[in-house]
Image (cartoon, helix red, strand yellow):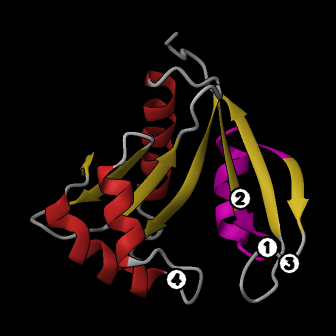
Amino acid sequence: MKIRDASEADVAGLCHFEAGAFAADRLSRRSIQRFVAASSARLRIAGTAGAIDGYHLVTFRRGSAVARLYSIAVADAKRGSGLAAALLTDAEHVAARRGCRALRLEVRADNRRAIRLYERAGYLQIGVYREYYADKCDAVRYQKPLAGALRR
């Protein structure tokens, strides 16, 4: 499975993928276009033969040593294949190569599968955002220190 940077040519496919992956709180076409072009973000796609099987989006803030895993998603057909773990590892490498010392994320409190993935990967809970999502579900905040972060 190849993981590569998204390009403008991927925007329509990412919009379609996003609509199938999330019932609410989706990235808009405009947001996807902005993230693809932004130097403060890396949107990476996993897939074969032009199909999108998953993606991750990492964002960066100037002057901060903490990157944010803004979004990660895997196609239903690829769940249980190890793709989510591969995307998470890739996100960590992207952040470390950018000089970040930690990767932070929020996850729905009711998303037990994702929470297990993050905890197995060494993420530690650092807080909770109450009623964070559109449906008022809480978000659990996690963070992981990144080994091998390169100095900027």
Of badges 2 and 1, the one in the foreground is: 1
Amino acid, disc 1:
Tyr
Q: Which mark is residue 103?
A: none
Label pair 2/3, CB-CB below 8 angstroms: no
Secondary structure of residue under mark 4: loop
- Measured along the vertical axis of the image, is residue 16 above or below residue 149? below
Amino acid, disc 3:
Glu
Q: Which residue is painted at 41% across and 62% down in the image? A: 81
Say which residue label 3 marks: 131
Q: Is residue 116 magenta?
A: yes
Say which residue label 1 marks: 132
User: What is the x, y in percent for residue 7?
Assistant: 20, 55
Amino acid, disc 4:
Phe
User: What is the x, y in percent for residue 25?
Assistant: 59, 80
Secondary structure of residue under mark 3: loop
Work out whether mark 2 precedes mark 1 in sequence or the reverse, and give the earlier one. Answer: 2
